[in-house]
Image: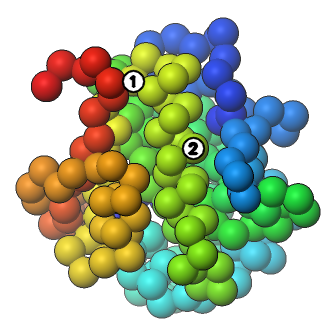
Amino acid sequence: MPNPHTAAGSSTWQSGCVPALSPSRVLVGPTIRLRSIRSDDQPALRLAAEDSAIQKYCFPNPEPTEVNKEQWVRLQLHPSDAQTARFAIADHEDEALYGAISLHIEVGKPTIAESGFWIAPEFRQRGFALEAVEVIVDWVFRDLEIERMELFIDFDNLGSQSVATRAGFQHHGDVSYPIPTGVTRDVQRWIREGVGSPS
């Protein structure tokens, strides 16, 4: 889950761009909804920033300083753009924040999407991450011109590896993953191909 980067398909889709997410459009699963991350999510985001697992796997700089915590919170609140969409993983009814999931498409690679996710500690082990990944995968393969989904997961992040396996991803070796601090970290690469995608 090192890439902590809408809903329903959009006729504004162009290759290599993620349709803008508006508050009135959400992706919905059986128990969650994926909505835009809002300013009123800040208290929950700041609480999540205190979690050691989120600091280790999601912070650009894993040192748990107040500056790094605030930088991570600001990253979560950054609006979606042409290459990256960010969603709150929220309760289906009251929209309380459980975590977040992102979708990123690199310039020049319009048929490949990367996703990353995190769940606040009090909501783990309840299937929300798996449901969010399945909702995102269904959306991009059904409504967008995506042929392959990728996850990049730390070697010791067994929870996220379990989510990847149950969501139909396969481990495709290890890679050096660039992070915003200008360094790389060695992670596992997980891939799921869309139906009919070239092998």
Amino acid type for the residue under numbered disc 2: Val
Q: In which quarter of the image is residue 166?
A: bottom left
Q: How crowded is mark 1: few (under 14 residues within 10 Å), some or many (20 or more)?
A: many
Which color mode does the image show?
Answer: rainbow
Q: Do the residues labelled 2 and 1 touch (CB within 8 Å)?
A: no
Query: In terms of depth relative to the viewer, which is nearer, 152 or 40?
Result: 152
Q: Which quadrant holds the C terminus? A: top left
Q: Where is residue 30 in the image (x, y as percent from the top left)?
A: 70, 52
Query: In terms of depth relative to the viewer, which is nearer, 135 or 38?
Result: 135
CA distance for labels 2 and 1 = 14 Å
* Left or right: 144 in relation to 114: right
* Left or right: 81 in relation to 97: left
Dot 1 falls on a residue whose secondary structure is: loop
Label whose residue precedes the other's in the sequence (2 or 1): 2
Amino acid type for the residue under numbered disc 1: Ile
Q: Residue at x 33, y 28 (%)?
A: 194
Disc count in the image? 2
Q: Residue at x 64, y 22 (%)?
A: 9
* Left or right: 102 in relation to 61: right
Dot 2 falls on a residue whose secondary structure is: helix
To which residue does mark 2 refer? 135
To which residue does mark 1 refer? 146
Q: Which quadrant holds the N terminus? A: bottom left
